[in-house]
Image (spheres, coloured by chain):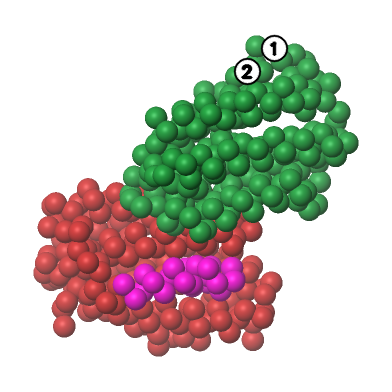
Amino acid sequence: MISSRLWSRCRPIAEQCRDHPFVQGIASGRLERPAFQHYVAQDAFFLEAFARAYALCVARAPDRESMRAFKGLLDAVDDELELHRSYAERWEVDLVGAPAEATSAYTDFLLRVASLESPAHAAAAMAPCMRLYAWLGQQLKPVALRDSPYYEWVETYSSDEFDAYAAALEALVDRLAGDEAALYSHYSTAMRLELAFFESSLASR
Amino acid sequence: MSLTTATLIERNAELWDAATRHEFLDRVRDGTLPVAALSRWMEQDYLFVAGLTRAWGRLLVGAPPADFRLIAAGIGAFSDELGWFEERAASLAVRLDREPLPEASTYIKDLADLATRPYAVAITGLWAVEVAYLDAWQGASGGDERFSDVVEHWANAEFAAFVAELAVVVDHELAASPEHHRAAEDAFAAVLSHEALFWGLAGLD
């Protein structure tokens, strides 16, 4: 399957994300609060762009089945946005600020691909976020401290429900397919942008 | 005079009547419509709903996040609507592989363009599609039982509630952006003109 090959080829970047002090700090609970607050605020910008990119995929889907699948994923990200709002409130995060450079780089990339390229390319650019977060959640779950203030993050992304969304998007990558070199280019770009997103949150302290 | 959903309808009364009253609807209500005419119209409407779903995908791209859920609900409803056509296609002799007639294809193309206009303009035009459709089918309800299940499908309380919720958003957008009033009214009028022509696709004339 294309999606599993793309993931395997990018596995070293996924491991860098897992071992990143920001992610490790979530598991250990030692992450400083301002870094997490910055991350939550930036994630709101990211999720909004993600929803817009899915909506563009609905608009440009090549057939009914993929239109339905993108619509299901759009609903899921809408739910995540809702969850995010209550999360932000609890963490006393101001969602009014501006996107950081690492956030804009990522959202601009996603929206450019979703606007100008095929839905297959958009799916390849969007899949890393879903699969990476599901994988990070699953990797951290057995080692994360239950009393880490960030344990809810680990629970959200290690859930079967989130894994199913990642799988649904990967199924679209596999079904829509296309030139694998181009798909890899987008997939690996998104993976690097994920790493930069964690880096930027840590640097914000 | 401020522009609202109510004043848009009042100020364009003639277009409103043309868009919402038609011999096709009268004959649905009194049960004298030939089934072949309903089938012809439904074949074009199926293509239209597919285009409408895509247009709503584009609408979300320019929407404020607070409206994401409503727009996603719209996309979901239209997507379900396509499924409803597919279920009934065989029993009503509706072919789902027709080419759009010129009136339908122009309307679909105009909606795709409209959806990318400033949000206040786009949401006004896309609300116009729904409110005219609802009013037209409400006018066709309560008559002969022959087509009552079809009429009820398009004139039900859930759809009416969705249209009402949409009107709240349109009123909010119009109040916030007087600079778009002229374009919004033009979009409203253009949609009604398309709607008026669309009933003719049943081929009664």
- Give the label on residue A143, or none: 1
Magenta highlight range: B105-126
Amino acid type at mark 2: Gln
What residue do we see at 19% from left, 73% from top?
A: B202
The quarter in which the C terminus of chain B is drawn is bottom left
- Which amino acid is tagged 1? Val
Chain assignment, label 2: A
Q: Which chain is red?
A: B
| x, y percent for residue A143 | 69, 12
Q: Along the horizontal axis of the image, is A195 left or right of A133?
A: right
Q: Which residue is mark 2?
A: A139
Q: Secondary structure at mark 2?
A: helix
Residue B136 in the image: above or below residue A195: below
Q: Which chain hosts label 1?
A: A
Please say if B136 is above or below A181. Answer: below
> Which chain is green in the picture?
A
| Point 45% across, 82% down: residue | B189
Which of the 4 image quadrants contains residue A13? Answer: top right
Q: Are marks 2 and 1 in contact (CB under 8 Å)?
A: yes
Residue B43 falls within the magenta-colored stretch: no
Q: In this image, A128 relative to B136: left or right?
A: right
Q: Secondary structure at mark 1?
A: loop
Label 2: how many Cα within 10 Å (few below 14, some 14–19, many 20+): some
